[in-house]
Amino acid sequence: MQNQDPAAANAEDLLINNTEEAQNEGTETAADATDENTAEISAEEKLQQENAALNDKYLRLFAEFDNYKRRTQKERIELLQTAGKDVIVSLLPVLDDFDRADKAMETAVDINSIREGLKLVHSKLKSILSQKGLKDIESINAVFDTDYHEAITKIPAPDEDMKGKVMDELEKGYTLNDKVIRFAKVVVGS
């Protein structure tokens, strides 16, 4: 092989070099493919882990919200059941006073003492209710106002000043914390 043509030798060297380069490229391509598979697997695993974390977060948030709904519903039911408790408790002394007045009426000879006792119980009841925010609607001689009054009937006014004003009150009206809870039933002058 020593007598080979220099061009042939160059060609042979070139062929050997190309073969080595091709083998090196094949090795590099295989290594790159392995790295890409590893990168794809790790990216895929990373996405799966993120998906699992988000699902877990979603489930926990949903469970927390569900517990919140149950708790607030339970609190609302308890509030409705005991909403009037403080009013009822404050009215118990008035009920006791009425019981005492009822017993006193059975054996009473003097009606004036019974009348005084009932007036005291009535004023006590009104003061307790006013402490809770209940107020009377003043109607007599006031201008008729549909926000506070309900006209039952109209009667002729005795003079011009009484036209459009409340002449008589058949049933008292009340507000609770400045909101009408019962309209006053009135007779209006026309």
Image (cartoon, rainbow, N blue to C red):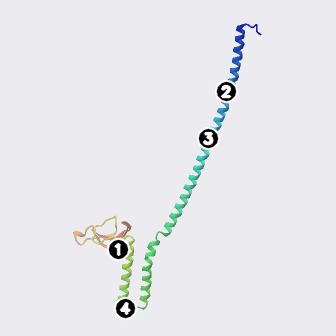
The extreme left residue here reads 160
Task: Specify which label sits upstream in the sequence, 2 or 4.
Answer: 2
Nearest the eye: 61 or 145:
61
Select label 1 or label 4 by which is in front.
4
The quarter of the rendered structure image containing the N terminus is top right
Mark 3 residue type: Lys
**For residue 37, which numbered disc appears in the image?**
none
Select label 3 or label 2 by which is in front.
2
Mark 4 lies on a secondary structure that is loop
Q: Is residue 183 left or right of residue 159?
A: right
Q: Residues within 10 Å of mark 3 (few under 14, many from 20)?
A: few
Mark 4 residue type: Asp
List the residue tagged with mark 4. Answer: 110
Task: Specify which label sits upstream in the sequence, 1 or 2.
Answer: 2
Mark 1 residue type: Leu
Tags 2 and 4 in contact by the CB under 8 Å rule? no
List the residue tagged with mark 3. Answer: 46
Q: Residue at x 59, y 51 (%)?
A: 59
Task: Specify which label sits upstream in the sequence, 1 or 3.
Answer: 3
**For residue 170, which numbered disc appears in the image?**
1
Select label 1 or label 3 by which is in front.
3
Q: Is residue 157 left or right of residue 22?
A: left
Mark 3 lies on a secondary structure that is helix
Task: Specify which label sits upstream in the sequence, 3 or 4.
Answer: 3
Select label 3 or label 4 by which is in front.
3
